Amino acid sequence: MGGEQGLTRQGWQVVAERVGLVLMVSSLPLWLVLPILPFLPLTLEMKAAVAGGVVVVAEVMFWAGAVLAGPTVVRRLRSWLDFGVRESEEQG
């Protein structure tokens, strides 16, 4: 079918923003592994390796997502997550 078109520059930007947002949000649950890790039946060396790996993967996912999403999406996500901080700043 010869009439197929690729995504425009704006279309790729929307895809990158969505992929970036998904990467950023999906990196957050990885941090929940860390408090559970001491209770798993693993050796100390394995726990240390898993903890290090989880931290590295979560950070890489978050920052790669932030780069893909762009500053506008990062600001929007931060405003959603900083709601408690802003309320306390307004009161104090």
Image (cartoon, rainbow, N blue to C red):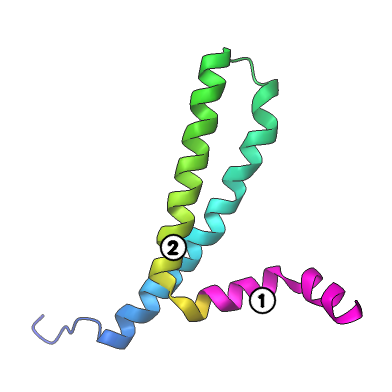
Q: Position of residue 35 (x, y in %)?
A: 70, 34
* Vertical position of residue 26 compared to residue 48: above or below: below
21 left or right of 91?
left
Q: Residue furthest front?
A: 92
Q: Tell me the amino acid under the disc marked 2.
A: Gly
User: Residue drawn 45% across and 44% down?
Assistant: 57
Q: What's the distance in space between the residues labelled 2 and 1, CA to CA? A: 17 Å
State which tag comes first along the sequence, 2 or 1.
2
The circle drawn on residue 67 is none
User: Residue drawn 62% across and 71% down?
Assistant: 78
Magenta residues, dominant SS class = helix
57 left or right of 25?
left
Q: Position of residue 32 (x, y in %)?
A: 65, 42
* Vertical position of residue 10 compared to residue 57: above or below: below
User: Residue drawn 40% across and 67% down?
Assistant: 67
User: Residue drawn 53% across and 52% down?
Assistant: 27
Segment colored magenta: 74-92
Q: Position of residue 36 (x, y in %)?
A: 69, 31
Q: Is residue 79 magenta?
A: yes
Q: Tell me the amino acid under the disc marked 1.
A: Ser
The residue carrying pointer 1 sits among few (fewer than 14), some (14 to 19) or many (20 or more) residues within 10 Å by Cα, namely few
> Disc 1 designates what residue?
79
Q: Position of residue 17 (x, y in %)?
A: 42, 74
> Disc 2 designates what residue?
65
